[in-house]
Amino acid sequence: MKRFTRLALAISAFLALASCNSAPSISSPEHVEWAVESMAEYNVEFTKETTPTLKLFMAKATGKTGCNNFNGSFSMQGEGIKFPTPTFAVTKKMCPPEVMEIEEHYLGLLGRVQSWKIADNNKLLLLDELGNELLTLSFVRELESTETL
């Protein structure tokens, strides 16, 4: 009986620890850091250094374009979301032409986004006005309420 109790406790402890390490279930794109997996009309494999990112927190959008950093605002109502990319502040570092192309394409697509949805495995899909997928982003981490963007 003691052996069974120890085994049950060990299994319970393992399950508790395993549940702590799993990604949370995401229901909104806000308060999350995302990494771009794919961009419409653009077929390229990103490196760790050139992967565009997006952080959405309290109507602020920040991230990396693959080359430079950017910050600006976004507006969200229900499943509608818009990024006024012409007003984004973007650093002016020069990168190789292929990386600058990633930046230009990424910011262009963000400017066309009209809505969002969360897909399986915590993927964020950013869609155009017709519901076509422009960007697929993967969950990186939840943002802390004390973080500054």
Image: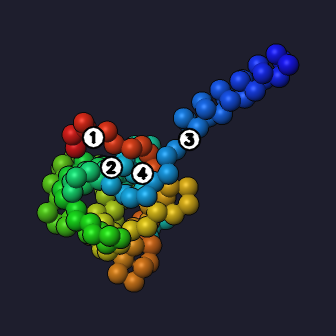
The image quarter containing residue 42 is bottom left
Residue 128 place in picture, x, y as percent = 36, 77
For badge 3, the amino acid type reads: Ser
Which residue is painted at 21% across and 57% down in the image? Answer: 59
For badge 4, the amino acid type reads: Ala
Q: Which residue is mark 3?
A: 22
Please state which of residues 133 and 21 is positioned toward the viewer in this rendering. Answer: 21
**Residue placed furthest toward the top:** 2
**Foreground mark, 3 or 4?**
3
What quarter of the picture does the N terminus occupy?
Answer: top right
Element type at mark 4: strand
For badge 2, the amino acid type reads: His
Which residue is painted at 37% across and 57% down in the image? Answer: 29
Does residue 118 appear to the left or right of 94 in the view shown?
Answer: right
Element type at mark 2: loop
Query: Residue 35 has which mark?
Result: 4
Q: CA distance from mark 3 to mark 4?
A: 18 Å
**Residue placed furthest toward the front:** 1
Q: CA distance from mark 2 to mark 3?
A: 18 Å
First in sequence: mark 1 vs mark 4: 4
Element type at mark 3: loop
Element type at mark 1: loop
**Foreground mark, 2 or 4?**
2
| Residue 66 appears in the picture as rendered | no
Q: Which residue is mark 2?
A: 31
For badge 1, the amino acid type reads: Ser
Residue 57 place in picture, x, y as percent = 26, 51
In the image, residue 30 above or below residue 133: above
Query: Residue 145 has which mark?
Result: 1
**Foreground mark, 1 or 4?**
1
The answer to whether the residue labelled 2 contacts the one labelled 1, judged by CB atoms less than 8 Å apart, is yes
